[in-house]
Image (tube, rainbow, N blue to C red):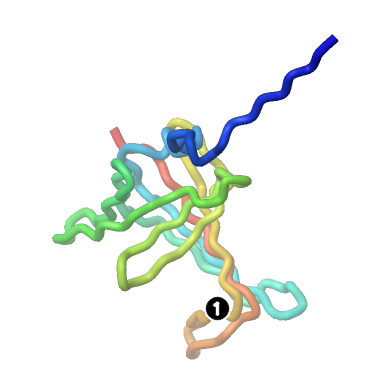
Amino acid sequence: MALFLTGCNDDDDPAVPTPEPAIAQLVKGQWSNNFTSEEYYDLDGNVVYADSADVDVRFNFKGNNVDISHPGVEGVDTWVYTFPKQDNENYIYLSQTGKTSVGYDILHMSADSMVWMNEIQWASYDDGSGEETSAKGVYIYRFIRQE
């Protein structure tokens, strides 16, 4: 009985594109961020301030870009979005060249709704009496698909 092992040199193989995560297909299209909430925590993990609001911020995901706009307001902000964590497709990263970049955990994703969360250490907030700093700020963004 003979056993033959063969191998191939990775340098000779053409680059195989990494498949796009399934969630990347679901996110494509037009969405409205229709609700946001924010909670701020002290060092002991207690909520020290919370707020929420109904909003309407439009996100149009196409290709590798997302256009963000506000109905009734001129202009569109274009960002690049990626799903950079190969071990966690439920993480989306938005960036603008030379400007801000931010990552969000996708807590829920379906054909018609999604929810994102972002945590920031030492987040600032205004409680009405002035600006305060918390140990952590947690921001939730709810989206519904637009037709």
Q: Quadrant of the C terminus?
A: top left
Q: Is residue 62 above or below residue 136?
A: above
Q: Quadrant of the N terminus?
A: top right
| Total number of numbered discs in the rendering | 1
Which residue ends up furthest to the front in the rendered image? 2
Give the structural element (helix, strand or loop) at label 1. Answer: loop
- Image coords of residue 11 (percent x, y): 50, 41
Q: Residues within 10 Å of mark 1 (few under 14, many from 20)?
A: some
Picture residue at 52% right of the left edge, 81% below the top: 124
* 48 vs 98, nearest the viewer: 98
Q: Is residue 145 above or below residue 34?
A: above
* 43 vs 10, nearest the viewer: 10
Q: Is residue 39 above or below residue 135?
A: above
Quadrant of residue 95 within the rendered picture: bottom left
Which residue ends up furthest to the right in the rendered image? 1
Picture residue at 57% right of the left edge, 46% below the top: 86
Quadrant of residue 28 within the rendered picture: top left
- Image coords of residue 116 (percent x, y): 51, 52
- Image coords of residue 7 (percent x, y): 64, 29
* 2 vs 47, nearest the viewer: 2
> Which amino acid lies under the numbered mark 1 shown in the image of this protein?
Ala
Side of 75 relative to 67 (left or right)? left
- Image coords of residue 146 (percent x, y): 31, 37
Side of 128 relative to 95 (left or right)? right
Which residue ends up furthest to the top in the rendered image? 1
Q: What residue is disc 1 on?
A: 123
Picture residue at 32% right of the left edge, 53% below the top: 56
Q: Is residue 91 above or below residue 22?
A: below
Picture residue at 35% right of the left edge, 43% below the top: 31
Which residue ends up furthest to the bottom in the rendered image? 130
